[in-house]
């Protein structure tokens, strides 16, 4: 049996479905962009700023975690900065053989200096496209509504997603503080999304119980669930999620940092995977959580004894769960499965009838 090392995992083809742009930029780029845009930072020394931004082994509430975004967002208020950070993200993920990534962010948070919502989409799209051209990583944009901002704003962002459907935007999300800000208050936005045949994912079961997941699915029509850590507390709902093949976007490191789980060894991801639930592994925020997809895979190996065949299955599941056209998913699944077989001797998890992939 092939031993599993960090180097080996870094070479595996990967798919990322849950990555926040504003939590996944480079510290050095923050410093440089702050100088360009005359932005005041809490620290102007690399080591001090990097230490502040990376949660590392510090734990706190989800609200504490979100505070770091005040810094990153402060340097993401111009078209040039958004283009740069999107491009650099693709450059970074290419180094660990990410083949497809869905990048999420809320354009409304990038309008403090006069940038329009359309500008905030166009610039990111251009950066992602340049990254794809140079590094071969395909991508899609997920627009985020924010729970603790008004439902009217979510509706405005949903309308933006409708206008950019088939123009780079592949889905709609609801992020932000979960407790005291129920998803059902944003139902009108999700009605618009569903009515225009756009896929939705919702952060749920991260900082609140399974009722949040229930709302996301049954009142907002979520096609995927971001995190879903507390799904295990409602066995009937867990069976529903499994029966209806609703994927979970699991983010191990950030779940520990935000106290979504008391210890990673008790994280339910292994139980979900064993039950047959569609589990995907993701970074959430590469900078804030101080992680990469390779680190998340390695963590799953060390915690749950996941092996190469498990990683192949998880990656294929993630690609099957992507918010892109079915025909494009089939091509990507085939390409990734072939890479696993050719380069790592892992037979692809194929269904003979391609239309069922």
Image: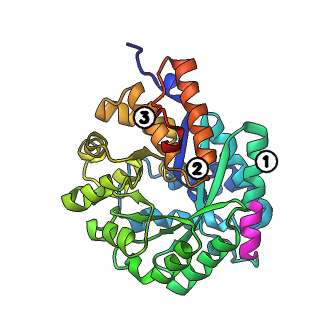
Indicate left or right for 159 with 275 as reference. Answer: right
The residue identified by callout 1 is 130
Specify the principal SS of the magenta part.
Answer: helix
Q: For the point 57% across and 82% down, which residue is it?
A: 155
Choose between 304 and 199: the one closer to the eye.
199
Q: For the point 47% across and 47% down, which residue is it?
A: 282
The residue identified by callout 2 is 326
User: Residue 145 shows which numbered tag?
Assistant: none
* Quadrant position of the N terminus in the picture: top left
Residue 86 position (above or below residue 39)? above
Choose between 223 and 29: the one closer to the eye.
223
Specify how the rendered protein is coloured.
rainbow
Instruction: Find residue 208 and report its image quarter.
Output: bottom left
Contact between labelled residues 2 and 1, with CB atoms less than 8 Å apart: no
Indicate left or right for 53 with 3 as reference. Answer: right
Disc 3 from disc 1: Cα separation:
30 Å
Indicate left or right for 48 with 75 as reference. Answer: left
Residue 152 position (above or below residue 236)? below
Instruction: Find residue 213 and report its image quarter.
Output: bottom left
Residue 134 lies, in percent from the top left, at 78, 39
Magenta segment:
115-123
Q: For the point 65% across and 49% down, which residue is it?
A: 139
User: Residue 313 shows which numbered tag?
Assistant: 3
């Amino acid at each position: 049996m092939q031993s599993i090392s960090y180097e080996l995992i870094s070479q595996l083809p990967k798919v990322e479905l849950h990555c926040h742009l504003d939590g996944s930029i480079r510290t050095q780029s923050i410093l440089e962009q702050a100088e360009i845009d005359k932005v005041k930072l809490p620290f102007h020394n690399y080591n001090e700023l990097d230490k502040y931004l990376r949660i590392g082994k510090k734990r706190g509430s989800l609200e504490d975690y979100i505070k770091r975004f005040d810094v990153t967002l402060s340097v993401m208020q111009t078209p040039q900065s958004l283009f740069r950070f999107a491009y650099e993200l693709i450059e970074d993920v290419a180094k660990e053989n990410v083949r497809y990534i869905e990048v999420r962010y809320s354009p409304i948070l990038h309008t403090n200096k006069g940038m329009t919502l359309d500008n905030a989409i166009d610039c990111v799209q251009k950066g992602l496209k340049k990254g794809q051209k140079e590094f071969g990583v395909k991508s899609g944009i997920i627009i985020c509504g924010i729970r603790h901002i008004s439902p009217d704003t979510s509706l405005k962002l949903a309308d933006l997603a409708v206008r950019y459907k088939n123009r780079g935007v592949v889905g709609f999300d609801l992020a932000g503080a979960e407790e005291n800000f129920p998803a059902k208050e944003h139902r009108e936005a999700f009605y618009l999304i569903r009515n225009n045949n756009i896929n939705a994912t919702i952060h749920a079961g991260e900082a609140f119980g399974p009722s949040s997941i229930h709302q996301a699915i049954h009142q907002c029509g979520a096609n995927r669930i971001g995190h879903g850590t507390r799904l295990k507390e409602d066995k009937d709902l867990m069976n529903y999620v499994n029966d209806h093949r609703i994927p979970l976007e699991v983010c191990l490191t950030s779940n520990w940092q935000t106290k979504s789980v008391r210890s990673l060894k008790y994280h339910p991801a292994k139980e979900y995977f064993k039950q047959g639930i569609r589990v995907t592994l993701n970074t959430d925020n590469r900078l804030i959580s101080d992680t990469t997809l390779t680190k998340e895979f390695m963590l799953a190996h060390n915690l749950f004894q996941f092996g190469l065949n498990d990683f192949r299955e998880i990656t294929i599941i993630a690609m099957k769960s992507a918010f892109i056209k079915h025909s494009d998913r089939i091509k990507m699944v085939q390409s990734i499965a072939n890479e696993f077989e050719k380069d790592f001797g892992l037979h692809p998890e194929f269904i003979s009838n391609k239309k069922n992939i």
